[in-house]
Image (cartoon, rainbow, N blue to C red):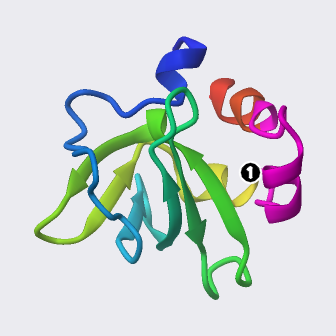
């Protein structure tokens, strides 16, 4: 997957500009992982921030838009093509670094891009 595609929604995922995904449930290939807390449609940096709740002790994880397989607006669910374990071991989302470090998203490209 190219770097650009990694941070963009697949054309077949069902993403619509302006669609508010906050509150949608997120489903990994092997079960639910939490709910969308934030999302960005930024060009070359589209992503979700997911609150995992009690599943992994309230961690927040960032998921690049390129790993989203499908968005079901009727069910309010987002399906991703990673397992719960892969997401569990992803770098934890850090709001301060996210807003202050221009290369912050690179760690997610490295982590998710090697799967």
> Which residue sits at x=51%, y=39%?
42
88 part of magenta stretch: no
Identify whether 64 is placed above or below 11. Answer: below
Kindly state the secondary structure of the residue where label 1 is placed: loop
Point out the residue furthest to the left here. Answer: 74
Q: Position of residue 83 (x, y in %)?
A: 53, 51
Point out the residue furthest to the bottom here. Answer: 54
In the image, 11: left or right of 113? Answer: left
> Which residue sits at x=17%, y=71%?
75
Identify whether 25 is placed above or below 112. Answer: below
Location of mark 1 (residue): 90
- Within 10 Å of disc 1 (Cα), the crowding (few <14, some 14-19, many 20+) is some
Query: Which region is colored magenta?
Result: 91-107
> Which residue sits at x=67%, y=60%?
61
In the image, 103: left or right of 10? Answer: right
Nearest the viewer among 105 and 57 is: 105
Identify whether 18 is placed above or below 6. Answer: below
96 part of magenta stretch: yes
Q: Position of residue 67 (x, y in %)?
A: 46, 38
Nearest the viewer among 113 and 22 is: 22
Q: Quadrant of residue 104?
A: top right
């Amino acid at each position: 997957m190219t770097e650009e595609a990694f941070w963009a929604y697949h054309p077949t995922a069902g993403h619509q500009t302006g669609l508010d995904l906050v509150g949608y449930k997120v489903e990994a290939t092997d079960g639910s992982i939490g709910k969308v807390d934030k999302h960005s449609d930024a060009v070359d940096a589209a992503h979700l921030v997911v609150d995992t709740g009690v599943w992994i002790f309230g961690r927040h994880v960032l998921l690049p838009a390129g790993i989203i397989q499908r968005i079901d607006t009727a069910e309010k669910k987002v399906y991703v093509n990673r397992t719960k374990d892969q997401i569990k071991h992803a770098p934890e989302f850090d709001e301060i670094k996210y807003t202050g470090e221009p290369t912050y998203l690179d760690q997610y490209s490295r982590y998710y891009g090697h799967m």
